[in-house]
Image: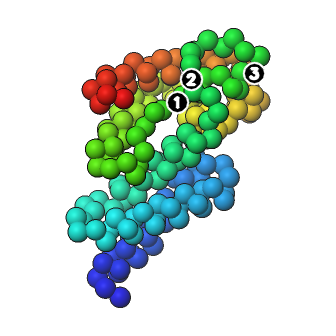
Amino acid sequence: MTERDTDITATVVRERTRLVNFIRRRIRDPDDAEDILQDVFHEFVQAYRLPAPIEQASAWLFRAARNRIVDRFRKKKEQPLADLSASGDDADSEYRLDLDLPAHDAGPEALYARALLLKALQDALDELPANQREVFVAHELEGRSFKEMAAESGVTLNTLLARKRYAVLHLRARLQAICDELGI
């Protein structure tokens, strides 16, 4: 086994448990979570063997996992968020965020833009009040329905919808400047 293979194996063994827990907190289906984990490790092996070394393997793995999770949820979305008014009868189909992120395989400029957007999104999420962030993450990233969250938490459906709305408004405002700068 080469030194690179040894480094790859050591990193995978060291980070596997933390990474799988990170993914499973965001992906409800265990099979989907395992698919994402395997995709991330495959991508890691491919990237590690490139001439430019990966400086911080742990950070790279978690960033790649977050990107894969966002990609998976983007593919599942049926409708983009056209506006923030909940005028339909099905509250669970409203308030979906449509992140128009560059594809992870669209070249170095797209990867850079994607990384900037994801970092800005994470920073903006961190700025939200906890109750807004929790509702946004549960609905957008974990795919949970508002009805399910209301039943579990005892918080009314309208309160959850309002929290999500405020979160989306904040995120849009924070991300608009970077999207304009990147031409997205």
Whichever of callouts 2 and 1 sits on the residue coming sooner in the sequence is: 2
- Other residues around mark 3 within 10 Å, as few (<14) / some (14–19) / many (≥20): few
| Pick the front one: 43 or 134 | 43
> Mark 2 belongs to which amino acid?
Leu
Of all residues shown, which one is farthest toward the front? 106
Q: CA distance from mark 1 to mark 3?
A: 18 Å
Residue at x-position 23% and y-position 69%: 51
Of all residues shown, which one is farthest toward the left? 52
The image shows residue 72 at horizontal and vertical percentages of: 56, 46
> Mark 1 belongs to which amino acid?
Asp
The image shows residue 19 at horizontal and vertical percentages of: 49, 59
Q: CA distance from mark 2 to mark 3?
A: 14 Å
- Element at label 1: loop
- Other residues around mark 2 within 10 Å, as few (<14) / some (14–19) / many (≥20): some
The image shows residue 56 at horizontal and vertical percentages of: 29, 59
* Residue that label 3 marks: 90
* Residue that label 1 marks: 98
Residue at x-position 47% and y-position 53%: 65
Horizontal placement of 12 versus 159: left or right? left
| Pick the front one: 87 or 30 | 87
* Residue that label 2 marks: 81
Horizontal placement of 154 versus 184: left or right? right
Whichever of callouts 2 and 3 sits on the residue coming sooner in the sequence is: 2
